[in-house]
Amino acid sequence: MRKDLLDQAARAHGGRVIAALAAKYRDLDLAEEAFAEACLNAAQSWPKDGDPRDPAAWLYSVAQRRALDMLRRRGVRTRLVPDPPAPPPSAEDLMVDDARLIPDERLRLIFVCCHPAVAPDARAALTLRLVCGLSTQEIARAFLVPEPTLAQRLVRAKRKIAQAGIAFEVPGPEAWPERIGAVLSTLEIAYAKAHEDAAGAGQHAGYAQEMLDLTAVLVELLPDEPECLAFAALVRYAEARRPARMDDGGAMTPLSEQDPALWRRPLIAQAEALLHAAARRRRPGPRQLQAAIHAAWCSRPSLDEPAPWPTVLALYDALLTWRDDAVVRLNRAVAVAEVSGPALALAEVDWLDGVAFRDFGPFHAVRADLLARLGRGGEALEAYDRALALDPAPAERLWLERRRGQAAG
Amino acid sequence: MQYALLIYEDEAPYAEENGQAWRDIIAQHEAFAAELVEKDLLRGGAGLKTGATATTVRRTAGQCGLHDGPFAESKEQLGGFYLIEAPDLDAALAWARKVPMLGDGAVEVRPIIEGTM
C-alpha cells in the first residue's frame, strides 16, 4: 500500500515538482532526492492525516524544505562554523493551497533530459524517470536491461549534466529545431518500448498512459510546434488500436487485418484534432506524414471496406523525402506489394539487404511473406526461420509461426 | 565555467606548410581568437606542430620510455586548442562549431576542473 502511494505520487506529480526544484536550485540530483524524501514523508503522513487538498503543492512545499536542508548540510561540510538548524515547517507553511505556486518548468526539464550531450541510451530513460516519474525497475523492464545497468546509466547521465554544465534552460531560436528534434526522437524511442508489448494489457499498459500524458503536456507547452502535435497524434492513433492488436490466441494482428470496431474512437478523435491543428501551421514534417498514415488506417470504417493501401503508399513516398531510412523503405515495400504486386516489392526489399538488416526481424518477416506469395516456398521458410531466430516478442512469434505454417502447408 | 576546445583534424591538407591554405586558416584562427578576446572569453590556447614532430614519454610501472610520434597514431590528430570561458555547455558548443578547420575534423569540448587553470 505504501509503495503504491509512493509510485502514484511520483507519477502524478514528480515531473512538475522535480522540474520546479531543478529550475530553482540548478541541481537535478538535489531535486530528485528532495522529491523522493517528500514522497516518503507523504507515505507516512497521508494515511494518518488524510490526503492533502493539493498533493502537488504539499509535495513541492516539503521537497523545498528538504532541498534547503540538504544544501545546508553540504555547506556545513565545507565550512567550519555550521548554520543554526532550520526551524521545522509550521502547519500553515505546509498548507499551501495553490498549485499555481509551483512554476511549470517541465519544458526545461524535458530539454535537459533530451540534450544531445546526454548519452543517447540514457535520454529516454532519464525523461521517463524524471518527467514521468516511472521507477527505475519499470524502465529497466521496458528497455530489457538489468536494473543496475539502467540505474548506472541514469547516474552517469545526471553526472554528465552537472559536470559538463548543461544549463537548465529552454534552447534559443538557433538551436531550437535541432533540440526539438532531439526531444521528439527521444520520446519516439520511449514510446517504441511501450508499444512493443503488443499485448499491452500487462505491465506496459500503464507506461503507455504516461506517454499519453507526457505528449499532452508537450502539446500544452508547445502548441505551435506541428511536429510535436503530430507526435502526440501518433501516440494516440497507436494506443487507439491497442485492443485490436492481438487476437484471442495471443498472436499479433497486423494493421490491415485489425477490426476497426475494436479501436478506441475517443483516442482517434483526439489524434485527428491534433493532426488538423498541426496541418493548420503549414509547416510540413515527417511526423505529420507518419500521423497521416495512421489517420488513413484509422478512417477505415470496417474490415469489409478495402484497406487504404494506395493512400498509404503515396504517404510513404512523401515520407521518404524526409526520412530515407531502412524502416520507412521496408514499410513502404509492404504497401508496394499491395498496390503493384509482390514481385516489385521483393525487388525493393532485396535492394535494401545489407548489414543493418541481418538482425532486423521485420525485414526477414516481410521478405518471407513476399517470397511465399511468389511461390518460392523454400526461401520463404528460410526467411521465416531467420525472423523467428531473432527472438521476437511473444505475440509476434505466434503470428510468425502461424504464417510459417501456412507457407509450409 | 571554463572549457577546453580540443581540435582534431586530418593533417594531410596542411602538408604544404607555407601554402595559401595554411595562411588562410591562420588568418581565420586569428579572427576567431580576436572574437573571443573581444568578449573577454579567451583564457589560452595554441596551435600545435604536426603529429610527426611529437615525442611521447610513456610511463609503465614507474619506468619512462620514449617513442617517436604522438600519443595515438590516428588519422585525425590533435592540432591545437582553445581555453575559454562560457556560461554553460551550449555556449561552449556554439564556439566549438565556429572553430576554423581546413576540412573535416572534430572539436572535443571538455569542462575544466575548477581552480586548475
Image (spheres, coloured by chain):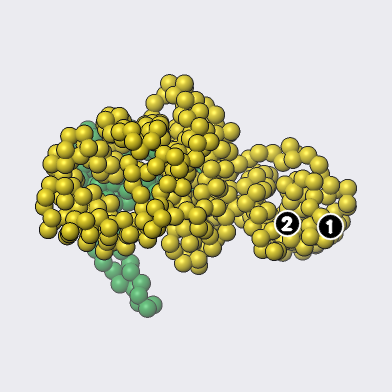
Chain colours: A yellow, B green
- Measure the C-alpha gap from mark 1 to mark 2: 15 Å
Q: Residue at x 63, y 40 (%)?
A: A105
Q: Residue at x 48, y 62 (%)?
A: A141
Within 10 Å of the Cα at label 2, are there few (<14), some (14-19), or many (20+) other Cα atoms? Answer: many
Location of mark 2 (residue): A38
Q: Residue at x 34, y 56 (%)?
A: A396
- Asked if residue A55 is positioned above or below residue A321 in the image, the reply reads below
The reply to whether residue A354 is in sight is: no
| Quarter of the figure with the C terminus of chain A | bottom left
Counting residues from the start of the chain, the first of labels 1 and 2 encountered is 2
Which chain does tag 2 point to? A
Circles 1, 2 touching at the beta carbon (< 8 Å): no
Q: With A45 as the anchor, is B98 left or right in this view?
A: left
Q: Amino acid at mark 2?
A: Ala
Depth order, front residue of A343/A171: A343
| Quarter of the figure with the N terminus of chain A | bottom right
Depth order, front residue of A269/A93: A269
Q: Amino acid at mark 1?
A: Asp
The reply to whether residue A378 is in sight is: yes
Location of mark 1 (residue): A49
Say which element carries label 1: helix
Q: Position of residue A178 (x, y in %)?
A: 43, 36
Q: Residue at x 17, y 59 (%)?
A: A408
Q: With A128 as the anchor, is A365 left or right in this view?
A: left
